[in-house]
Image (cartoon, rainbow, N blue to C red):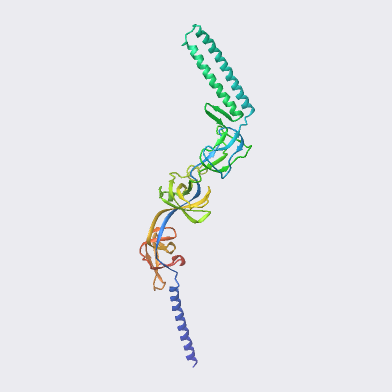
């Protein structure tokens, strides 16, 4: 009796163990992470990061040195060509003012001397002592005209130094700076009473204000050299702005730099120091902003430029691939002991997430997600 109970217990244990083994084996096969090859679209895109800026902007600088006397317009205001912007009040040094007065007095003396010489020669011509075509007489008349012009120039120079206003013929010289273009005041960098440096100085001139036409905005950014090699003017562009990430904006690629913007950088003077993947500047124009969207200069933006596109193709996630050398393979589930076998595939376009399968796999076919398998053995 005791032996029969022992034999029954052993038989039951073997049966339960075998059932557990086979059920575990089947469970593993069924629990493999599977992916289905689907029909989809893949786009290979170049990404440019940059800003939205005006296509045309100007910096306002003064041609004379002095002090800011009046400011007629401020940031955000729209102005038309010829509108007064800033009035400069001359503030000459005593040395410069003294020099201008001295030069004026010297010109006056030279004019008076030349007039006296001409008067003497005119008396000789009148008394027929010398002919009208006498060389000294002709030169004396020319000297009077020349010295008179010099006197006017010295007087105008003194007027500009003293008041900032003068006239040259029908033209009026003024220290009031006017708008060279129609646009919006982007920045104002000076205050009333602040001294400025002119464009005639050996130093860098003071940038007092900047203007731009806000109705003509473009995107300026940069792409890697790998993407730049595949770009050409006229390609369509899709952009998103940092303040409006949910809105897609379209434009046209209008410029691709022929030289890296970092090529001649002083900080990367040597070949060894230069970045291998230097940025190439790109520009996008004909941007279509939705009506009512507030656009400001300097908004950060990301531009996506489609390099290649494939529609209605068989796609799988790149993570599902494994490689034997340079040869891509996928794992096909089966009823084998390990639950799958490898199959070679030929790949096409990739966007970095999904990849096109040209051959070796059909739409709707299931594969094992290799990324979830760890170091899976090859069949």
User: Of all residues shown, which one is farthest toward the left?
Assistant: 359
Q: Is residue 101 visible?
A: yes
Q: Is residue 290 left or right of residue 94?
A: left
Image x and y of residue 302, in percent: 49, 52
Q: Is residue 379 visible?
A: no
228, 373: nearer the viewer = 228
Which quadrant holds the C terminus? Answer: bottom left
Image x and y of residue 120, in percent: 54, 10
Residue positioned 52% across, 18% down in the render: 145
Q: Is residue 81 left or right of residue 101?
A: left
Image x and y of residue 238, in percent: 45, 53
55, 362: nearer the viewer = 55
Counting every numbered tag in the picture gives 0
Image x and y of residue 14, in percent: 46, 83
User: Of all residues shown, which one is farthest toward the bottom?
Assistant: 1
Vertical placement of residue 156 versus 40, above or below: above
Q: Looking at the rendering, which quadrant does residue 113 occupy?
A: top right
Q: Is residue 344 left or right of residue 76?
A: left
Residue positioned 50% across, 8% down in the render: 126
């Amino acid at each position: 009796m005791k032996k029969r109970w022992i034999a029954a217990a052993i038989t039951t244990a073997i049966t339960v163990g075998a059932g557990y083994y086979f059920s575990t084996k089947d469970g593993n096969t069924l629990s493999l992470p599977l992916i289905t090859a689907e029909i989809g679209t893949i786009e290979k895109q170049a990404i440019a990061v940059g800003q939205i800026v005006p296509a045309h902007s100007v910096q306002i600088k003064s041609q004379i040195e002095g002090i800011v006397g009046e400011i007629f317009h401020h940031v955000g205001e729209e102005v038309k060509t010829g509108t007064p912007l800033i009035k400069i009040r001359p503030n000459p040094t005593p040395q410069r003012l003294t020099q201008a007065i001295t030069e004026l007095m010297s010109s006056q003396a030279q004019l008076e001397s030349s007039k006296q010489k001409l008067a003497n020669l005119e008396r000789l011509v009148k008394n027929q002592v010398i002919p009208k075509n006498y060389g000294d007489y002709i030169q004396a008349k020319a000297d009077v005209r020349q010295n008179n012009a010099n006197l006017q120039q010295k007087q105008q120079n003194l007027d500009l130094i003293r008041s900032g206003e003068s006239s040259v013929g029908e033209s009026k010289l003024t220290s009031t700076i006017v708008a060279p273009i129609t646009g919006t005041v982007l920045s104002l960098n000076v205050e009333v009473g602040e001294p400025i440096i002119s464009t005639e100085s050996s130093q860098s001139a003071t940038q007092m204000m900047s203007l731009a036409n806000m109705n003509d905005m473009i995107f300026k950014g940069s792409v890697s050299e790998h993407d730049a090699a595949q770009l050409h003017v006229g390609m369509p562009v899709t952009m998103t702005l940092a303040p409006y990430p949910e809105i897609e904006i379209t434009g046209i690629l209008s410029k691709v730099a022929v030289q890296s913007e970092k090529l001649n950088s002083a900080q990367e003077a040597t070949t060894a120091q230069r970045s291998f993947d230097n940025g190439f500047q790109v520009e996008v124009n004909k941007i279509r902003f939705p009506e009512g969207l507030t656009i400001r200069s300097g908004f950060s933006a990301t531009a996506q430029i489609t390099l290649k596109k494939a529609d209605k193709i068989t796609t799988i996630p790149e993570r599902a691939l494994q490689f034997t050398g340079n040869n891509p393979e996928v794992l096909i589930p089966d009823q084998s002991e390990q639950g799958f076998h490898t199959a070679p595939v030929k790949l096409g376009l990739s966007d970095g997430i999904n990849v096109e399968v040209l051959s070796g796999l059909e739409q709707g076919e299931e594969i094992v997600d290799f990324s979830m398998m760890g170091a899976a053995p090859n069949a």
